[in-house]
Image (tube, rainbow, N blue to C red):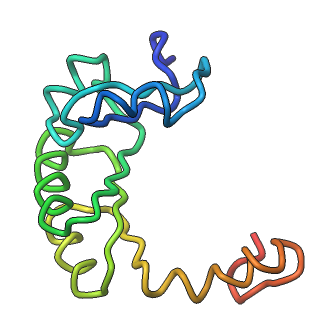
């Protein structure tokens, strides 16, 4: 039961993006506010998130958000992105459940993007 909440809730601090990022849908919403603040999420009805994805470009901001969200939502998986393995290690220490390392992911994902999902397979991607 989601208590009327959409399956995807995104937060942004730029009001101009609220109506432009996501096409309005019953299962998605973009809300204005500081998404790294657990109290802002709670004030919008997000009390027990199934997962949290942190996608700040700034490593320092991603670290701060991950740490704050881990403290506020101890049981929720937190996924984030990093540009290097060093940053990924730091994010894991800060509380990230999993980290996508962009420098590792781009070479692995590029063939899928260029040739299509059915033409390229790598070990472990068959499920």
| Residue 22 or residue 119, whichever sits in front | 22
Residue reaching furthest right? 119
Residue at the location (27% across, 78% down)? Answer: 88
Q: Is residue 7 left or right of residue 73?
A: right
**Residue 127 picture location, percent across and down:** 75, 69
**Residue 53 picture location, percent across and down:** 37, 51
**Residue 16 picture location, percent across and down:** 35, 30
| Residue 14 or residue 98, whichever sits in front | 14
Residue at the location (15% across, 63% down)? Answer: 63
Residue 45 higher or lower than 20, as above or below: above
Residue reaching furthest front? 16
Residue at the location (51% across, 17% down)? Answer: 1
**Residue 50 picture location, percent across and down:** 42, 38
Residue 108 higher or lower than 50, as above or below: below
Residue 83 higher or lower than 62, as above or below: below
Q: Is residue 101 left or right of residue 126?
A: left
Q: How many marks?
A: 0
Q: Is residue 55 left or right of residue 106?
A: left
Residue at the location (73% across, 84% down)? Answer: 111
Residue 27 higher or lower than 17, as above or below: above
Please identify the quarter of the rendering in which residue 57 is found.
bottom left
């Amino acid at each position: 039961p989601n208590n009327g909440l959409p399956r995807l809730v995104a937060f942004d601090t730029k009001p101009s993006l609220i109506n432009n990022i996501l096409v309005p849908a019953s299962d998605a919403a973009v809300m204005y506010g500081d998404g790294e603040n657990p109290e802002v999420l709670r004030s919008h009805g997000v009390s027990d998130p199934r997962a949290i994805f942190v996608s700040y470009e700034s490593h320092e901001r991603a670290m701060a958000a991950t740490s704050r969200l881990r403290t506020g939502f101890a049981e929720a998986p937190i996924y984030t992105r990093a540009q290097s393995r060093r940053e990924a290690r730091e994010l894991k220490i800060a509380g990230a459940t999993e980290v996508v390392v962009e420098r590792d992911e781009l070479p692995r994902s590029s063939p899928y993007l260029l040739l299509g999902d059915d033409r390229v397979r790598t070990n472990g991607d068959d499920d």
